[in-house]
Image: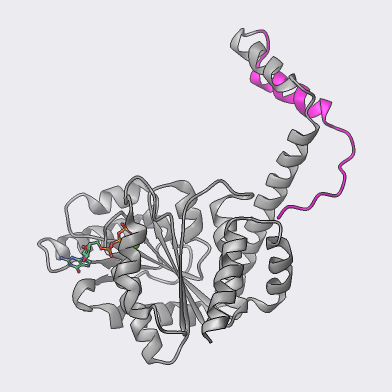
Amino acid sequence: VRGEQRALARAVSLVEDALPEAEAILSAVYPQAGGALVVGVTGPPGAGKSTLVDRLTSLLRKEGRSVGIVAVDPTSPFSGGAILGDRIRMQGHALDPGVFIRSMATRGSMGGLAVHTAQVCDVLDAAGFQRILIETVGVGQSELEVAQTADSTAVVLVPESGDAVQAMKAGLMEIGDVFVINKADREGADRAAFAVNSALELRAPASAWQPPVLLAVAAKGEGVDELADRFEEHLAFLREHGGLDRRRRQRLEQRLRELVRAGLWVDFEARLADGAWRAEVDALVARRATPHEAAARLAGANAAPVRGRAGT
Ligand SMILES: Nc1nc2c(ncn2[C@@H]2O[C@H](COP(=O)(O)OP(=O)(O)OP(=O)(O)O)[C@@H](O)[C@H]2O)c(=O)[nH]1
Ligand SMILES: [Mg+2]
């Protein structure tokens, strides 16, 4: 099993770094993937996401389920150096062959961060992990997209005043299927839960699922059972109403769109005549052309038939 873990770690690294071997790996794993349930845990920096993921993992392991953990964007300027922290917090699982942990740094990749994460998830999924937990800091558009690649997503907030408002601004209120006010050992947790509930009432009902708002003290393991239960309930709800298939279809459609977009761009750049780009930028700066005109010229100059070039 140790050897298997090593082989898996290597495959994940190849995919993560988008090395040439990645394409073959992805082709091999894609047909095998789709069996895992993917759960997202997102929220502001330091809210306790890793602690929750760690505790959820212990619970799932007790139930005999294997768990893949993908921690995305641990090197964001907001959470600086948290890779080490994640490893330390989750090292209780380091020797468990039923758990695979990978921290992924944000880096430029074909199709963006969400596609990249989905590819790593496919590898873990095909390797047979029954649950995949994605931890991502909910601070930017690409992180929100990552959170949306999950079947079910928990948004983790803390009691401090204003957090719920910030969550609304950051778009977190839109993507949560379950809300957790963590660090409920601090003052104001009830108030925060009330604020989140109020904000949720303003949210356009996407379905009949009413996102629950829970209190938790992840550091002590309190509220983790309930979170796990709510995840299961939400997944059961989705299955019952066909929402799981619908979500997954939307997700794959989005992934395809990103890849086509990225592929077209690579193709476009490859064909761009030397200096053409710079000339158009010069024209814009000098206000000799409008952005629309410049774009149309560049696109037009590239309108030759497209050779087959599939995205990775
Ligand atoms: N008081 C209190 N502290 C907690 C609780 N849960 C986690 N913490 C502490 O909060 C700090 C941040 O926890 P993490 O789990 O690393 O939070 P995170 O959201 O993963 O952080 P980033 O990944 O850096 O964004 C750690 O020092 C935890 O020990 C809690 O319920 N109560
Ligand atoms: Mg973390």
In magenta stretch: residue 311: yes
Q: Residue furthest right?
A: 305
Give the quarter of the figure containing the C terminus.
bottom right
**Relative to 78, residue 58 above or below:** below
Q: Which residues are magenta?
A: 288-312
**Relative to 120, residue 8 above or below:** below
Question: Residue at coordinates 39% horizontally, 77% vertically from top-left?
Answer: 94
Closest to the observer: 209 or 141? 141
Residue 101 drawn at (x, y percent): 44, 71
Question: Residue at coordinates 60% horizontally, 79% vertically from top-left?
Answer: 127
Count of all numbered marks drawn on residues in the image: 0
Residue 270 drawn at (x, y percent): 77, 35
| Quadrant of res 241 | bottom right
Closest to the observer: 235 or 310? 310
In magenta stretch: residue 9: no
Q: Is residue 38 visible?
A: yes
